Image (cartoon, coloured by chain):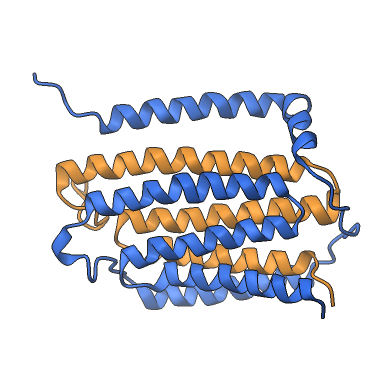
Amino acid sequence: MGIGDILFAGIALLTVVSAAWVAFSRNIVHSAFALLGTFFGVAGLYVFLSADFLAVVQALVYVGGILVLILFAVMLTGKIGDVKVSNRSAGVLPGLLLLVLLLGLLGALVLATPWQVAGPAEAVPTTAAMGNALLSEYVLPFEVISVLLIAALVGAVTLVRKEEDK
Amino acid sequence: MTVGLVHYLLVAAALFSLGLFTVVTRRNAVAILMGVELILNAANVNFAAFSKFTTLDIGGQVFSLFGIVLAAAEACVALAIVLAVFRTMRSVDVHDTDTLRG
């Protein structure tokens, strides 16, 4: 077991434990900060998958953007007084049953399926290849997602704008 | 033992299950959104893992990137809706927002 395996185990553990904290914490601010660990753990997994560009995008967009947005929403929608137990859950027992069953099913599927593994691709910088792919083979999805992004941003601004005086 | 495809798939399965658990049990709309983010992250890890271990090309990573963009769009619209709901209902508990229930 080399140093790489130990590092991978550590990062995978960080990811899963933080995700469990997100799922089970009774304080929504703790959940939001545990999400930070998950996002950084997934960025680490991308580094292990030799997806350097994806790792940086994950850190920038998730940690720098989405997490800050979620924290803003938590602060803006919570009542300051009851921030202690602000993350109530309902139906935890059926939820736990679902969690265990789903995890068992997915795990059994992953272990039982004979994957056509072609050996790990060599670790080369991916940024240039990704730029080429985005502007040649995947140019249509790229354009569609640009339109979707601008529609989402305009929609978000319209939704949160204060009503004008009638 | 080296780290292979199966290990990434198992981590992603754990992320997905925990995300689904969060979505079905939480009552706070923002916490439900966090669960959705976990699920999307699990899908993105799978894309990148298959890209490295089976197809050996960049396609999986490109779709991971699209997944991240979709998550960003989803987060900003959903949080705008949550803020709008909070302004009218003074609550983000999904059990309180049942005005349309017959």
Q: Which chain is rendered orange in the image? A: B
Residue drawn at x 47%, y 47% as measured from the top left: A64
Horizontally, residue A3 falls left or right of residue A28, namely right
Horizontally, residue A84 falls left or right of residue A96, namely left
- Which image quadrant is residue A164 in? top left
Residue at the farthest left position: A166
Residue drawn at x 45%, y 59% as measured from the top left: B35
In front here: A71 or A16? A71
Quadrant into which the N terminus of chain A falls = bottom right
Residue drawn at x 34%, y 54% as measured from the top left: B30
Horizontally, residue B95 falls left or right of residue B12, namely left
Residue at the farthest top position: A166
Residue B48 percent across, percent down from the top left: 72, 51
Q: Which chain is rendered blue in the image? A: A
Taking A154 as reference, is B82 above or below it? below
Say how many tags the image has: 0
Residue A142 percent across, percent down from the top left: 65, 28
Residue at the farthest front position: A3
Quadrant into which the C terminus of chain A falls = top left
Residue at the farthest right position: A118
Residue A69 percent across, percent down from the top left: 38, 46
Residue drawn at x 49%, y 51% as measured from the top left: A63
Residue B83 percent across, percent down from the top left: 26, 43
Taking A146 as reference, is A106 above or below it? below
In front here: B61 or B21? B61
In front here: A113 or A31? A31
